[in-house]
Amino acid sequence: MAESLAPPLPAFTPVPVRARRDGWTPARQLRFMEWLVETRSPARAARAVGMSKEGAYALRRRPDAASFAIAWDAALAQGKARSSGPSLYERGIKGVMVPYFYGGLQRGERRRHDDAALGKLLRIATRNAERAGRGRG
């Protein structure tokens, strides 16, 4: 998996499951979230960790999986923000280098953060969190 530009996933409590080597272990749940950011596809993320899409959705629907479901939505939001252009994340969070000039010559560069891009990232995250909250009525 390529190095991610996105911030780390929010901490989540893995769904407690019966210990099985081929099951949804806490480590497998974390890797699933990482792949979910990369692929924005629950089916592809599940396949990447050796599990089924149906199993992922069943795990998400469990009554004790609220933290997992919130992290799932956050992973999708991060993936979406990254896909709307790495530049959105770059401009809002990391900033971009902008040259500055004095006396007609470039004298250096400074990092400038784009507040509008940051606002858009926050709106995406907030909207996904609100949708997640409505889904658990």
Image (cartoon, grey):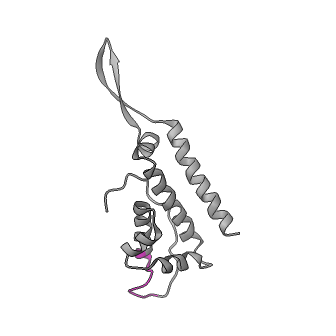
* Dominant secondary structure, magenta: loop
Residues 57 and 25: in front is: 57
Task: Place residue 60 in its image quadrant.
Answer: bottom right
Q: Which quarter of the figure is the C terminus placed in?
A: bottom right
Q: Does the magenta stretch include residue 22?
A: yes
How many labels sit on residues?
0
Q: Where is residue 103 in the image (x, y as percent from the top left)?
A: 31, 11
Residue drawn at 52 percent across, 81 percent down: 16
Residue drawn 50% across the image and 60% down it:
76
User: Looking at the image, is 35 positioned above or below residue 114?
Assistant: below
User: Which stretch did the figure color magenta?
Assistant: 19-28
Q: Is residue 77 rendered to the left or right of residue 102?
A: right
Side of 42 where 63 appears, left or right: right
Q: Where is residue 124 in the image (x, y as percent from the top left)?
A: 56, 51
Q: Nearer the viewer, residue 65 or 50?
A: 50
Is 30 placed above or below 74 here? below
